[in-house]
Image (tube, rainbow, N blue to C red):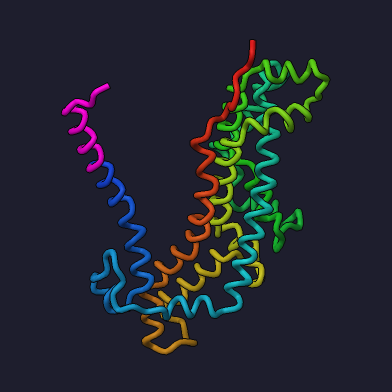
Amino acid sequence: MSVTRGYRVFQWVNGFVLAGVVLVTLFPFANVVARSFSGEQEIRSGQVSFWPKGFNLTTYDRVMSDAMFWTNYRNTVYYTVVATLIALVLTTCYAYVLSKRNLRGRGALVGIAVFTMFFNGGLIPNYVLVSSLGLRNTLWAIVLPNAISVFNLLVMKAFFESLPLELEEAAAVDGTGTYGTLLRIVLPLSKAVLATMTLFYAVSFWNSWFAGFLYMDRQELFPVTVYLRNLIAGATSGTDNTASSEAALQIAASIQAVTIVLIMLPIMLVYPFIQRYFVSGVMLGAVKG
């Protein structure tokens, strides 16, 4: 099949347009990274764009030399891994149940889940509930209140409903039970949605700071987002008495950029390994009739 002149023009135009979209998308990230390595005067005068100016590592050195930063960073990794695993298990089980159209009470279970998307008890009742259950200053104060995202639940439910019923019927004929069907048939075919849910939950728990700020009283239990939030508050309010005046000005100017880089870096490193499942085929084989 010959390539026409019009199609070649389309390819060039399409390439230029997509390249422009990529540049517009990457500019904020490049600017944040450049600001995190730039000097205080250059940042305040607006001279920083793609490349750092007045190269400076004062803020990075201040943050990363603090032992509490690494303690809170370890807490965040631990909270994220445990919370994501629990959320995946609960969401998968709930979604698999809701995907059964012949289930009695299915409409009520879906209604209960959807109701929580629009209405909740409020901040104070949630705080009182967590406190009365003795969950404050524990991992469960962060994990349990956000264990199931209704949006993720509905996405996974729709995915399970799209799987051919013949697969589960064939497993039932072979004597496989409900849990065996879920573990041996459904989940191996659901790598794409499981990878997506893993990324959604991991990013949500990694970036979460309010739960730790609300339910944790001891600094050694804070997630790293709360540590960096407190560092920003101290730097921008001018209450940092441990640093010299020049260092304090540098930290105040670049702390937000450094914070964004330190928080988004782990997610950016993990994302390429999960992203490959997004484009892979969900059904590797067809149902033979």
* Magenta span main SS: helix
Q: Please, which residue is most extreme toward the right here?
A: 175
Residue at 54% in and 80% down: 65
Q: Which quarter of the image is occupied by the C terminus? A: top right
| Vertical arrangement, residue 219 with respect to residue 87, above or below | below
Residue 22: x %, y % from top left: 31, 48
Residue pictured at 57% horizontal, 31% vertical: 154
Quarter occupied by residue 247 = bottom left
Q: Residue at x 68, y 21 (%)?
A: 100
- Place residue 48 in its image quadrant: bottom left
Placement of the N terminus among the 4 image quadrants: top left
Residue 250 rendering spot, x and y as whole percentages: 37, 80
Q: Which residues are magenta?
A: 1-16
Residue found at the far top of this picture: 289
Q: Is residue 59 left or right of residue 193?
A: left
Question: Which residue is at 37% across, 79% downward?
Answer: 56
> From what the image shows, is residue 202 above or below residue 47?
above
Where's residue 58, x and y in %? 42, 81
